[in-house]
Image (tube, rainbow, N blue to C red):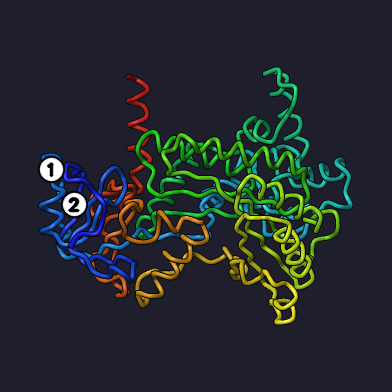
Amino acid sequence: MAFGFFKKKETADTILINGKFITADPEVPQVEALALRNGRILALGDWEVLEEELIGPDTETVDLQGMYLMPGLIQAPAQPVLDSFRSLLLMISPKWNRDTIKDEVGKALRKKAGLLGYGFSAALLKDLDPEQMRKELDQVSPIKPIVLLSSDGIQVWLNTPAIEKARRVAEEEEVSQITLPFLVGALDLIDTDQLQEQVLLQSGEYCKMGITALWDTGAPDYFHSLYHEALVALYQEGFLKQRFYGSVYMDRDVDPKGLAQKLMQNRTLCNEMNGLVHFTTLHLLRDEKVPEGFGLSREGLEALATAASDRNFHLLLQVRGSQALQETLETMDRMGRAGGRTPWILSTDAEISLELRQEIGSIEAWTVIPDMDFENKIPAITGKPMEEILETYLRKPSMLLGEEDVLGRLEPGIHADFVVFDQNPENKEAKVRYTFLDGQLVYDAVEDRPEKWYREFLEQWQKEEEE
């Protein structure tokens, strides 16, 4: 028996055989072979049937030699964007006060010509005017440029050397407006070559875990833009190893029209990436501990959520504190009753009481996940019961992404993204042998060395430049 719809003359690009296939589809739990065509699953079922119907003169047959094949694992949510920057800048904890930040900046500057930092709460600067802000960082270094970005990527805290150098470069290049990308570029605070290398090293780590799709949450637009440029280069040279779903993060009130424009621009940039890079989500954070005027207000949340919803972006609402939770739920419930259709995902550290559930009748229609904590690394995937693996890394994340129709199981029409383990992934000792993306082998544990990918990428890029 074969499961799939194909014409007699339509042959497979690839057929995988002689493996243990974990379909993640309870209606078709066991099959003998898997046929692929044009980056999708064409059919699956009995080997003899697929051999007779789908093998053509150009079909490649891959013998899995008894290894375990299952749909590519999905990490959602995750923070690949910020993770790729961690070694390139100073990550500032939102718990640090100004004195702690200055101490840590001083330490980080010892071996650097300048420093970019990210993550402080904009409320820390509420009592300082721009001159006072500058003088505080001048005390850390009156010579080396320092640029610190708030958690939303909007507030910039500079010292005098950073301001003066940026002005000189702007005058030389006849630039009338100093934007954040220009500022960081003029001061040479991010090495884009190092960023590219970090993205590839990170991709290798995900390959080793069997992850073929990522949903990034938590990165402000500036970092997301640089990361996207790195993905474009990887895609053009054939080094893209995971499917990527991006988002924009915001934790304060901003102009909804400007944010909507940025969302649409990011979506447009993904159109030429063959469905491998997406931009799907607005991530909003409300924290009731943030002083008024520096966080995301109830009115601001409604305005930004409406702007994103009207343009069919998903909403990830991260809420901290019981009062903020109630206000957020009331706001989103009102929006839903007014005709809102966009999927909402709620992440919170507060308990949703029975009384609140009864008051907000639409809560059950939303997806609720625990408060996201990215301090810890992704736990080991293997060594767990299969049902837990399927739920945690396939069913739930594909639902969070709204991609249940194309990810998360082996079924005709689904993206041909999968991982091959050398033994049953329920065993703790199981290792990833291969990962496939759109039917193409992107990682071979025996042949590939992720630490060498960047050098190979450069060699290929330079060769094409010479041609």
Q: Is residue 411 left or right of residue 130?
A: left
For image coordinates 41% across by 64% down, the residue present is: 394
Q: Position of residue 445 (x, y in %)?
A: 27, 55
Q: Quadrant of the C terminus?
A: top left
Name the element at disc 2. strand
State whether residue 338 is above or below residue 14: below
**Residue that label 2 marks:** 15
For image coordinates 70% across by 58% down, the residue present is: 285
State whether residue 413 is above or below residue 113: below
The kind of residue on which mark 2 rests is Ile
Q: Position of residue 404 (x, y in %)?
A: 44, 59
State whether residue 130 is above or below residue 65: above
For image coordinates 55% across by 36% down, the residue present is: 268
**Mark 1 surroundings: few (<14), some (14-19) or many (≥20) residues within 10 A:** some
Q: Which of the two residues, 184 or 282, is positioned nearer the viewer here? A: 282
Q: Position of residue 410 (x, y in %)?
A: 31, 60
**Looking at the rendering, which quadrant does residue 45 occupy?**
bottom left
Q: Is residue 387 left or right of residue 323?
A: left
The kind of residue on which mark 1 rests is Gly
Q: Which mark is residue 56?
A: 1
Q: Which of the two residues, 309 or 456, is positioned nearer the viewer here? A: 309
The extreme bottom residue here reads 354
Q: Quadrant of the N terminus?
A: bottom left
Q: Position of residue 258 (x, y in %)?
A: 72, 39
Q: Is residue 120 left or right of residue 458?
A: right
Q: Is residue 253 left or right of residue 200?
A: right
Distance (Cα) linking label 1 and label 2: 11 Å
**Mark 2 surroundings: few (<14), some (14-19) or many (≥20) residues within 10 A:** many
N-terminal label among 1 and 2? 2
Nearest-to-viewer mark from 1 and 2? 1
The answer to whether the residues at label 1 and label 2 have Cβ atoms under 8 Å apart is no
Name the element at disc 1. loop
